[in-house]
Amino acid sequence: MRPVSLVLAAAIAVLSALSSAPAEDRGDAAGGVPGGIRGLVAMNTADDARGWASVGKILLGERGFCTGALIAPDLVLTAAHCLYDRDTGARFPDRLITFQAGWRNGRAEAYRKVRHAVADPDYVYSGEDELARVGHDLALLQLDQPILLPQLAPFAIGSRPSRGSAVSVVSYAKDRAAMPSIEEGCGVIASDGSALILTCDIDFGSSGAPVFALRDGVAELVSVISAKAELDGEKVALAVPVDRPLAALRIELAGIAPARAGAAGVRVLSGGDGASGAKFVSPAAPP
C-alpha cells in the first residue's frame, strides 16, 4: 500500500468557511441538511441537540465561521487555522472572534467574545495546504466570561482512538450553518503519526469540529477536525488528536494571558467555499 502521507499530500483542503457575505447570512437558510450528505443527521430541535449544545459556531468577524467545543467553562477547542485570514495570512484579532454555543436556527444558548486565543506552538501558517501542518492544527480560545449554564457542560478529554474505532463528529458547515449536524459511527482508518484519518463526512465550516469517542457511556472529545482529503479516490477527514498537544496549549495560554491582556489573538489557516486548491474540492451579550 502506498504511504498515506504521499497519497494525501496533494489532496488536502482546510475547512474554515470564509466568504465576503456576512456570517449569519451563509449556510442553509431552510435549516435542513442537503440531500446526499452521507450519514449526517441535523439537530433540528432542542431535544435533538441535548448533550451536544456545548458545540458551537466560532464567528470570525464577518469573514466566516468554524466549529468549536467547550472543554472548560471559559475554554473552547478548535483548529488553529481558524485564527488566520486566508487572503492576507494575518491573524484575526481576538476581539473579532465570537463563540455561539449551541447555535440553532438563529439563536445560541450562550454568546461569548474571545479574550485570548493561542495556537499549538509548533503550528506554522504558510498559506499552503500541507499535510505536515495537520498534526499541529489545534487552538485554544479563552472566553471573556465563563459559560456556567447547566445545559452547556464542558466535554471531557479522551485519549487518541485506535485504528478501527468508531467515532462521532458534531459540526456546522457551509450548506448547513443554521444548526449542528451529527455523524455517528464513522471510523478511524489510520491512527499512527500526528494526525488521524477518518471516514467522517465534513465540509467547509467543519474546521475545529470535535470528534468524540463513546467510552463507558460518556462522549469524550478525542480529536478536532482539521481538513478534508482524498485517499485512494475516497473522501476522508483529517483530525488532530488532542490529549497531548492540549497540555502545551494550556501552558501557552497561561503565559500569554497576563502578558498580553487585550492583545490580538490567534491566527487562521484557511479554506472556504471552494477557495482551496485541493484536487477533489468543489467548490454580544451573555444570555
Image (tube, helix red, strand yellow):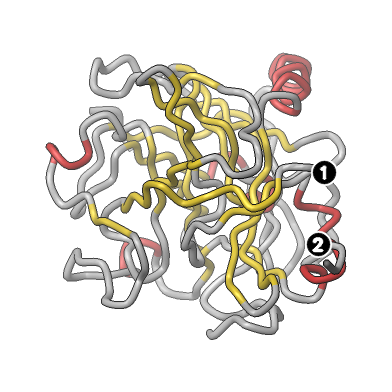
Question: Mark 1 belongs to which amino acid?
Answer: Gly
Left of 20 or right of it: where is 2?
A: right
Q: Find numbered disc 1 in the image and state the secondary structure of the residue it sits on.
A: loop
CA separation in Å, label 2 and label 1: 10 Å
Q: Residue at x 20, y 53 (%)?
A: 106
Residue 66 seen in the figure? yes
Mark 1 surroundings: few (<14), some (14-19) or many (≥20) residues within 10 A: few
Q: Residues within 10 Å of mark 2 (few under 14, many from 20)?
A: few
Relative to 113, does residue 232 appear above or below in the rendering? below
- First in sequence: mark 2 or mark 1? 2
Q: Position of residue 84 (x, y in %)?
A: 68, 55
Front residue of this view, candidates 83 and 22:
83
As drawn, 273 above or below 114: below
Q: Disc 1 marks which residue?
A: 193
**Where does the image place residue 149, in percent across and percent down from the top left?**
26, 18
> Which residue: 34% across, 49% down?
182
Frontmost residue, 139 versus 234: 234
Q: Which residue is mark 2?
A: 4
Amino acid type, label 2 = Val
Residue at 56% x, 26% y: name it: 142
Determine whether 36 is above or below 140 in the image: below
- Asked whether residue 260 is in view, the answer is no
